[in-house]
Image: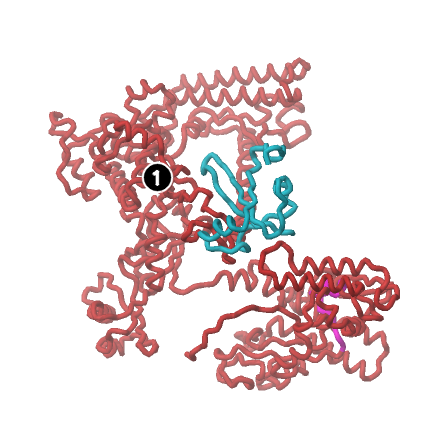
Chain colours: A cyan, B red
Amino acid sequence: MDNNIFWLNKLVPKHVLLDDSEIEKRLKPLQIEKKQLPKILLKDPALKALDQEAKPGDVVEIHRFDDHAGTNLAYRLVVEE
Amino acid sequence: MREMIPKKIARIDFALMGPKEIRKLSATKVITADTYDDDGFPIPMGLMDLHMGVIEPGLRCKTSGRKMDEDPGHFGHIDLAMPVIHAGYSKTMKDVLNATHPSSGRIMLTQDRIEHYNVQIQRLIDSEAGTTVTIGGIVRRAIREAVKSKTCPHCGEEKIKVTLDKPTTFREEGRKLTPKEIRSRMEKIPDSDLLCLGFNPKITRPENMILTVLSVPPVPMRPSITLESGERSEDDLTHKLVDVLRINQRLRENRDAGAPQLIVEDLWELLQYHITTYFDNQTAGIPTARHRSGRPLKTIVQRLKGKEGRFRSNLSGKRVNFSARTVITPDPYLSINQVGVPELAARELTVPVRINIHNLAFMRNLIKENFDPSDPEQYIPGINYMIRPDGRRVKLTDENWEFNHERLEPGFIVERHLMDGDIVLFNRQPSLHRMSMMAHEVRIMKGKTFRINLCVCPPYNADFDGDEMNLHVVQSEEARAEARILMRVQEHIRSPRFGGAVIGAIHDHITGMFLLTHGEASYDIDQTVRILSRVEYKKDLPKPEYPKAKGGPRWSGRQIFSVLLPDDMNLKYDASVAVSLALTPEENAELDLTVEIVNGQMIRGPVDGHSISAFKGKILEEISRLNGSNAARDFIDKVTRLAVGALMETGCTTGIDDADVPKEALLQISDAQDVAVKEVDKLVNAYNKGKLQPRPGRSVEETLEVEVMGVLGRVRDKSGEIAGTHLGMDNFAVIMARSGARGSMLNLSQMAGSIGQQAVRGERISRGYEQRTLSHFNKGDLGADAKGFVRSSYKKGLTPTEYFFHSMGGREGLVDTAVRTSRSGYMQRRLVNALEDLRVKYDGTVRNTANTVVQFKYGEDSIDPTKSKFGDAIDIDRLIEDAKGGK
C-alpha cells in the first residue's frame, strides 16, 4: 500500500479491506447488514490500488481525516456495478 | 364509521391493463356521446351513466347504491372500433418492434443470449445485496443487442427497420404500419422472450400498449357544473370523451358500410388524435385540442403534472383546517415565544380537549360563559362542538347549550376556542429554513392582526409593510409536546447553520441599549425605577454609582443593564463603536469603548451590536450557549423592554439634518474630488498617448480601468472620512450606524459627502451609445464623469447624468435579486427532495428511509451545530482562560 504513488496524495483517504470477522465486528454495533452500507464500485481506482484484490461483497474501511472532525471511519460495500 | 381491517401492503406492481382487465373493471359500456336527456337526467350508457357514480344529491349510484359524497364512482369503458396507439408508450413500442422479428415473433437474440439476460434479471430480483444495476439497465442492453443484429437467429430472415414519426406513426420502409398490424406483431411474441424486453408476462404483455378498449373515468372524477344561468358545463375530460365517442361511432359506421379505404383511414387517424390528446394535450408534434373559447383543454396528464398538478399541489401539499392568516404587526411587550392572536381568529380556531374530572367544571363554565357571558368585555374561550363518547358531534347553539352543559361528563371531547398559553405553529412563506415555522404561545388580543416580538422578524424575514403570516393550531397531545420541546422560538435562538444566535436585539433595541449605557450616562432614582420596572425587577436597587450627585443619587446605565446579566459572567471585548473607529486598544480603552464585565457587573464600555445583536452579540452568545434557551429567551425579552424604557428616557430621532456637514467640509470634499478627477484625466491622457504601462497580466485597457477605479474608490473613502470627522456621536444617525443598529457609515457618507462610482457588472458604466454612455459626452471620453462617477451626495441631489448612471447600477441590483431568488429556489427544491428522508438515528448514524447508512457519524463528528460555538464543540480559548483562573 505504501509503495503505490496513488496513496501519496493527501486527498486520497486510506482504504482497508476487512475480512469477514472484522466486518461482523464493525457492523454489529451499527445493527446493519452489509447491504445497508454505502457502495463502492469494484472499478474504483482506490480498490485497484490496494495490495489485495477486492471482490464484490467485500467491505472496505475508509480512514478519513479532516482538521475539524479528526479521523473518521466509513465503510463501503464493494459492488461490481 | 366502518371498521377497517389493517393490512400491510407487501408490494405494488405497476402494469398495463389489457382489454380484459378494463372490461372487468367497467361498470358500464358507454356508447352514446350524449350526457343528459331533456329532463336533465343522465342517459343510460352515456358518459354520465349512473353506473359510473353520481354527482347530484338525491340520486343513487346504480352500481354500489351509494349517495353522492359516499361514492367515489366506478370506471366504464368504450369499445374502440379500431385499435389505437397509446402515445405514452410509443418509444417502448419502437424498441419492441425493432428488437423482434415480425415473421418469427421472436426477440432477435440467440437462445443463449436470451438465457443470459433472463438469468441476470432473475438474479437481480432474487439478490439481497445492493447494486447500482437496475432491471431497466439490463433490458436496455438486451434490446440494444437485439436491435443491432441484422438477421433473426430464429427464422434466419433479414429484418426491416421500423421508424417512429412522433408521436404515433410507425413506418416500415416508408410504409405506414397500422395499429392493428403492430398489435398482431406484439401478440406473436412468445412469453418466454418477454422478460428481456422488460415485460413480466405474468402481469402484462406488450400488445396492451395498443388500445382496443378505452377506460372511462368515473363521473365524480369529471363532474359537470351547473352555471347560474342553469346551463350545464361539462368537465374537459368529458368533452374529450365526447369527441372520442363521436369519431369512434363514425369510424364504425363507415367501416361497416364499406366506405372507401381513404375515409376510414382519415377517421382512424382522427380517433388516434383524440385519444392521444385525451391522455396528454401537450404531446409534442400534434396541435393541442382546444375548448370552444380557445382555451387548451386540461386532460389527464395536465391534471397530474407540474406545480399545480395533483401530486405537488394536492398530495405533497394540502390545504388544512385549524389555520389562520392575517397581517402581522409588532409588539415589543410580547415575549419572543408569544404571538398575539386576534379574538376573532381565536373564536374560530379550536383545540380538542378530552374531559376528565379535573377539567369538567372549567369546561362547563366555558360553555356557560360562551352563551351567557358574565363580562362581555373580557375574552373567555368558548366551545363550538362537543364530541360524545359514541363519536357523535354536537354543535352547541343558543337553544341547546343549557341542556348539553349539564350532559358534559368525563370521556367527552370538546372543541375549545384558543386561549392564552396554547401552543401554535407560526409560519411565513417562503419557508426557506426551519426557523420559518416556529411554535409560539398564544396571547389573545384585541385588534385584527397577529402580533409578534420584533426580535423574531429576522428568522421569518418578516417586516410590517403588509406582510401576512399563517398560524396553525396543533390538534394532538403529541404534536403539542413536540411543538413545545422542539419548535418553540427559544429553541431556535441558536442557528444550526453556524452555531451562533440568529435571534437577538435589533434596530431600536441596540440604539436604546447604547443610549442607556454609553459614556457617563446616568439616571436619577425616578428614571432608574421607571426603567427597571419594565423588566419586572423585584430585588433591591443596586448601590448608586454616583451617590453624591447633585439632585440625589444617580445610577449609571451600565448598572441598570447589569441587572440582566448572570452573576458568573466575565467577558472582555471591543464594542461595535470601537471597531468602526479603528483605533488602537489604548485609545479605545481611554474612550471607554472596550466592554468589560466582571462577575456579572458591567464595569466598562457601552452595550451595542457587539453585545446583544444576533450573529455578533457576545453577551447574547454567552448566555444562549451556556445558560440555556430559557435564560436566552428571558434575556432577549428583557433587553427589548429595557431598550424601550431607555428610549423613553432619552429619545432618539434622525432626520435630514443628521447628514449636515459644514461648508468647509463640503469644499474639502469637492477639492479632493477635483484632484481625483484630474488624476483620472492624467491616466486617460497617458492611455491615449499610449504611454500607460500595463500591469502584469493585464491589457492596457484593463490597467486603465483598474487604476481609475482605484483613484475614484479612494476619493469616495476620503470624502467619507472628511464627512465622518464632522459627524460625531451627538448625531443619532451616527449612533445607529456605529452601534450596529441600522445603516453604516458608508450610507451616511453617501448622504452627506459623495455617492461615488456607479458600476454595472463590476465595471465602470460603459454601455449605451456608440463609444459613449450618453449623448452628453464626447465619443471615447474615458473621464470620471462620463463613466458613471457620481460626485453629488444624496442630500445635495444628483445631476441628470449622475441620476441616470445611478439608476443603471440600481437596476442591476434589482435584476440580480430577481434572478438569484428563482435560481436558488429551484436549487433548494432539488436539495430538499434529495435529503428530505434523512434522519439522525439514536446510534448517531444518519440513515434514509430504506435504513441504509448515509453517514456513520452525524456530520462526521457527531456535533450538534446549534450547541457548538461557531462550529466548534468546545470553546478551547475560554476553557484555558477559566483554567488559568479567569479574569
Q: What residue do we see at 55% from left, 76% from top?
A: B220
- Could you tell me residue B590's position as x and y percent? 28, 19
Chain bearing mark 1: B
Q: In which quarter of the view is residue B44 placed?
A: bottom right
- On screen, residue A6 versus residue B880, left or right, reads right
Q: Residues within 10 Å of mark 1 (few under 14, many from 20)?
A: many
Q: What residue do we see at 30% from left, 25% from top?
A: B594
- Could you tell me residue B10's position as x and y percent? 53, 69
Residue B562 drawn in magenta: no
Looking at the figure, which quarter contains the C terminus of chain B? top left
- The answer to whether residue B657 shows anywhere in this view is no
Q: What residue do we see at 15% from left, 43% from top?
A: B538
Whether B469 is drawn above or below B151: the answer is above
Which secondary structure lies at badge 1? Answer: loop
Q: In which quarter of the view is residue B294 placed?
A: bottom right
Callout 1, which amino acid? Ile
- The answer to whether residue B810 shows anywhere in this view is yes
- Could you tell me residue B798's position as x and y percent? 50, 29
Which segment is the magenta one?
Answer: B82-95
- Could you tell me residue B868's position as x and y percent? 38, 40
Q: Which residue is mark 1?
A: B506
